[in-house]
């Protein structure tokens, strides 16, 4: 009951127009997230079917390397497995991130004056650069979906 009362109070304080504005801003920022995911070398899962304005994004993450690095930086994801069972040669691992307007909050001193979303985007870029630099030649001999490929890349937990 308490959560319902809080939600109704929030709606009364912010108003329908306020929530509409906030969620439109979040939808706009999701375009930045999608671009950053692709710039990190990841593919957006089912990109062509992703609903405009969706606050959830899923990415293929070979061997789960970036998810592991980002979790170490304090970000949380839902793990995805067996993404394309009919095509075992494709990347089978990934993560899903669901954002709320809370991601647009200013972290103040803790985030260097950035929003939580900006901190995530910065960490994603850094983690991708680290992963590229650390990828060993031995790891490239194995598929990212194979156990040796995952272990040599330092991937999924």
Image: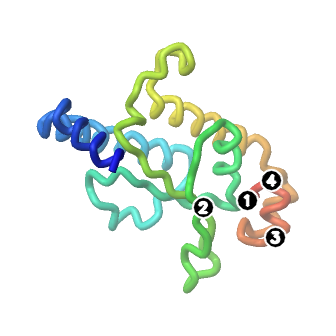
Which residue shows up at 23% across the image and 36% down it? 9
User: Label 1 near label 2: C-beta < 8 Å?
Assistant: yes
Location of the C terminus by quadrant is: bottom right
- Between marks 3 and 1, how big is the CA–CA gap? 10 Å
Above or below: residue 143 compared with residue 84: above
Q: Give the label, 2 or 4, closer to the camera.
A: 2
On screen, residue 50 versus residue 35, left or right, reads left
Disc marking residue 79: 2
Q: Give the label, 1 or 4, closer to the camera.
A: 1
Q: Secondary structure at mark 1?
A: loop
Horizontal and vertical percent for residue 131?
72, 45
Q: Secondary structure at mark 3?
A: helix
Which residue is disc 1 drawn over? 156
Label whose residue precedes the other's in the sequence (2 or 3): 2
Label whose residue precedes the other's in the sequence (4 or 3): 3
- Between marks 1 and 4, how big is the CA–CA gap? 7 Å
- Between marks 2 and 4, how big is the CA–CA gap? 16 Å
- Between marks 2 and 1, how big is the CA–CA gap? 9 Å
Q: Secondary structure at mark 2?
A: strand
User: Label 4 near label 1: C-beta < 8 Å?
Assistant: no
Above or below: residue 83 compared with residue 16: below
Which residue shows up at 30% across the image and 40% down it? 6
On screen, residue 153 versus residue 19, left or right, reads right
Which residue is disc 3 drawn over? 147
Which residue is disc 4 drawn over? 154
Which residue shows up at 80% across the image and 68% down it? 142
Crowding at label 2, few (<14), some or many (≥20) Cα neighbours within 10 Å?
Answer: some
Horizontal and vertical percent for residue 154?
80, 53
Crowding at label 4, few (<14), some or many (≥20) Cα neighbours within 10 Å?
Answer: some
Label whose residue precedes the other's in the sequence (2 or 1): 2
């Amino acid at each position: 009951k308490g959560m319902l009362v809080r939600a109704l109070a929030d709606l009364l304080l912010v108003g329908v127009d306020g929530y509409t504005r906030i969620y439109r801003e979040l939808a706009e920022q999701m375009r930045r997230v999608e671009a950053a995911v692709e710039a990190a070398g990841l593919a957006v899962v089912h990109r062509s079917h992703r609903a405009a304005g969706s606050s959830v994004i899923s990415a293929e993450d070979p061997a789960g390397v970036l998810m592991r690095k980002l979790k170490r930086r304090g970000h949380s994801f839902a793990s995805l497995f067996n993404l394309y069972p009919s095509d075992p040669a494709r990347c089978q691992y990934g993560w899903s991130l669901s954002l709320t307007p809370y991601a647009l909050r200013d972290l103040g001193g803790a985030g260097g004056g950035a929003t939580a979303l900006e901190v995530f985007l910065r960490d994603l870029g850094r983690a991708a650069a680290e992963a590229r630099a650390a990828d060993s030649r031995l790891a490239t001999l194995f598929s990212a979906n194979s156990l040796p490929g995952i272990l040599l890349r330092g991937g999924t937990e």
